[in-house]
Amino acid sequence: MTLATAFRTALVTVAIAGAAVLGTQVAQADGPVAPATTAGNPAPQATPSPSTTTDTNPWD
């Protein structure tokens, strides 16, 4: 009986771990989710439009 209990416990543990892994894969299937906006994590700001100059040398 001890062996049956240990087997049942191992089976349940594997099933729970598999469900957790599968849930993580499903959650990230469409890419990472953007974090919620909070006081410590402000909303992302729009990037400025590119300048109209043709000089693209960053060392000047």
Image: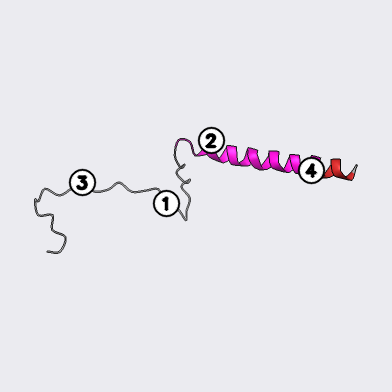
Q: Which mark is residue 26?
A: 2
Q: Is residue 58 left or right of residue 47?
A: left
Q: Residue at x 80, y 40 (%)?
A: 8
Q: Which mark is first along the chain, 4 or 2?
A: 4
- Name the residue that disc number 4 marks: 9
Sequence-wise first label, 1 or 4: 4
In this rendering, which labeled residue sits more in front, label 1 or label 4? 4
Q: Which residues are magenta?
A: 7-30
From the image, which quarter does the N terminus lie in? top right
Q: Are marks 3 and 1 in contact (CB under 8 Å)?
A: no
The residue carrying mark 3 is: 49
Instruction: Locate the C terminus by quadrant.
Output: bottom left
Residue sitting at the far front: 3
Residue 56 position, x and y percent, is 13, 54
The residue beneath circle 1 is: 42
SS category of the residue bearing label 4: helix
Residues under labels 1 and 4: Cα distance? 45 Å
Q: Magenta stretch containing residue 15, yes or no? A: yes
Of callouts 4 and 3, the N-terminal one: 4
Label 2 and label 4: CA atoms lie apart by: 26 Å
Whether 48 is drawn above or below 16: the answer is: below
The foreground one among 29 and 42 is: 29
Asked whether the residues under the numbered discs 2 and 1 touch, taking CB atoms below 8 Å apart as contact, a structural biologist would say: no
